[in-house]
Amino acid sequence: MKSMNFKKSISLFLGVIFMGMLFPICYANNSTEALKPTFTTQREQHYGVHYLMGHFNPKKMPGFVKIPRKYASRSGMYLREEALDAFIKMRAAARKEGVYLKIRSATRNFSHQKEIWEKKWLGKRQLSDGTNVARDIANPKQKALKILQYSSMPGTSRHHWGTDIDLNSFNNKWFEKGKGLALFQWMNANAAKYGFYRPYTVKNATRPYGYNEEKWHWSYAPLSAPMTQDAQRTLRDHHINGFLGSETAAQIGVVQHYILGVNESCR
């Protein structure tokens, strides 16, 4: 009898340890989401400053794969292989319910982000609300903050990591009715099952800083959560340089307020 009780105790103890390893790192934090599945993150390596800032060519980077045209709005985009595999499974599940997911944007390295940023900084490209920051805003810090409502400084974008995608539309209003609303509701209810969460939800007391809400932006958390942790540990504002307006990075506190300005449960 004592031997049997001892074996039961050992089995229970091992079971508790095993279950304790399966804790949630992050989940989609949206008001319409009822189900919050757990998953473990991948910690095979730490990601250094060079990688986190996107100083590489994804075409030549191990672990990155080209997104097949049928999944994207255009050819030539890349993702981390694990993120693409998860997206393909998620897309197939969505299609069965009449929801069609299409990747509009994926990996953007430092050079790509620099091109976007500097066009806006120089007024060659207007912001979504029609603002021309070169013409309308004189103060460099205020100019940067205006662009940062929706666009990242080079070296600070989650799109550098190969883990984040933009889906279907870059307009929040598109997701408020019709096909857009159906897609958004499906993603809120199901995306976390495949490891995707939305980093830029409505700004409030728990997310007071960072980019404005982006209903189109989803992140593959099994990879991006460890990268966010590495960014918190290793990236500093003085690393953010090499583009027009980079002197404002330290004034704004871009690492703390923007790179880390995601859902609190996902930092």
Image: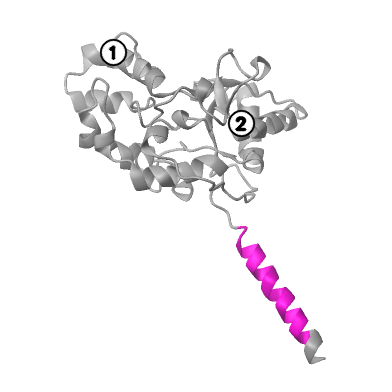
In the rendered image of this protein, does residue 211 appear above or below residue 134? below
Say which amino acid is labelled 2. Answer: Glu
Q: Is residue 73 above or below residue 32?
A: above
Query: At 61% across and 38% down in the image, what residue appears?
Result: 188
What residue appears at the point 62 percent right and 30 percent down from the top-left corner? 84
* Residue located farthest toward the left when viewing the structure as drawn: 139
**First in residue order: circle 1 vs circle 2:** 2
Residue 237 in the image, given as x and y percentages of width and height? 26, 37
Q: How many marks?
A: 2
Asked whether, in this view, residue 220 is left or right of residue 261, the answer is right
Q: Residue 2: x, y in percent?
A: 78, 91
Count neighbours of disc 1 (C-alpha within 10 A) and say few if under 14, some if 14 to 19, many if 20 or more.
Answer: many
Q: Quadrant of residue 239?
A: top left
Per the image, the residue denoted by label 1 is: 132
Q: In front here: 76 or 182?
A: 76
Residue occupying image coordinates x 68% and y 29%: 88
Which residue appears farthest toward the bottom when viewing the image?
Answer: 2
Q: Secondary structure at mark 2?
A: helix
The stretch of residues the image draws in magenta is 5-22
Please indicate whether residue 230 sits to the left or right of residue 147 in the image: right
| Front residue of 140 and 80 | 80
Residue labelled with disc 2:
81
The amino acid at mark 1 is Asn
Displayed quadrant of residue 117:
top left
Query: Mark 1 falls on what kind of element?
Result: loop
Can the viewer see residue 235 in this picture? yes
* Label 2 environment density (alpha carbons within 10 Å; few <14, some 14–19, many ≥20): some
